[in-house]
Amino acid sequence: MGSSIKIQIVGYKNSGKTTLIADLLQAAAADGLRAGTLKHHGHGGRIAFQDENSDTGIHRSSGAIVSGVQGEDTFQLCLDQPVSFSGLVRLYEPLELDLLLIEGFKEEQLPRVVLLKHDGDVQLLQSSTHVLLVIIWPSVSAELVPRVYPVYRLNEKEQYIDFLKDWMKGMST
């Protein structure tokens, strides 16, 4: 699935996935890495397009299953059909990213960071392979997390960012 490093960020709602991705994007940019993101819309239903009155909205309502618009240094692509996870990841390949951060898609199994906000969230580890590290909220008992995983507290941001940067350096050599 391409040569860029891929890391999944998984956890249940409001566990800090988006915040962690923002932190990782900032660290990647500071290191000169080209990073992108792919997010699963886990709230159910279709994604609402915000361009109904624009040309691309008219194109879609007239039957286009894919439409794109480019202006200045920006390109936006809207695809109105189901796409497999591997197909979505392949869409990123021509962009020659160094890093692709994937939010959600819990059923997929790529190297991942698991965020646990509540003790009951530990079940997410049972269905996870390729766990790089686990980040736990103060409300989670560290004893519930199997000792095979590196575990960081939510407030240990510098340490888990450094851990992931070291892991990425090892992947790129």
Image: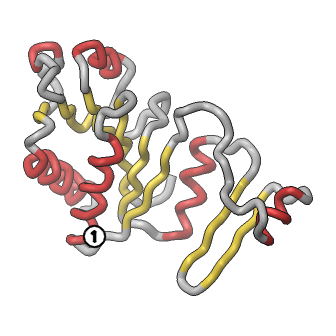
Q: Where is residue 160 in the image (x, y as percent from the top left)?
A: 14, 45
- Would you identify the image quadrant in which residue 83 lies? top right
On the rendered structure, is 91 left or right of 53? left
Q: In this view, does 57 lie above or below 9?
A: below
Q: Label 1, on which residue? A: 29
Q: Is residue 152 positioned above or below 128 on the image?
A: below
Q: Where is 15 relative to 143, above or below?
A: below
Where on the picture, by quarter, is residue 43? top right
Q: Residue at the location (54% across, 52% down)?
A: 89
Where residue 52 appears, as percent x and y from the top left, is 76, 60
Coloration of the structure image: secondary structure
Indicate the position of residue 14 as horizontal and vertical percent values.
34, 33
- Check disc 1: other Cα within 10 Å, few if <14, some if 14-19, many if 20+: few
**Horizontal and vertical percent position of residue 47:** 64, 45
* 49 relative position to 147: left or right: right
Determine the residue located farthest toward the front in the rendered image: 53
Residue type at tag 1: Ala
Q: Nearer the viewer, residue 86 or 118?
A: 118
Residue 58 placement: quadrant: bottom right
Query: At 16% from the left edge and 24% from the top edge, which residue is drawn?
Result: 148
Q: Residue at x 25, y 64 (%)?
A: 26
Q: Quadrant of the C terminus?
A: bottom left
Name the residue at the bottom extreme. Answer: 72
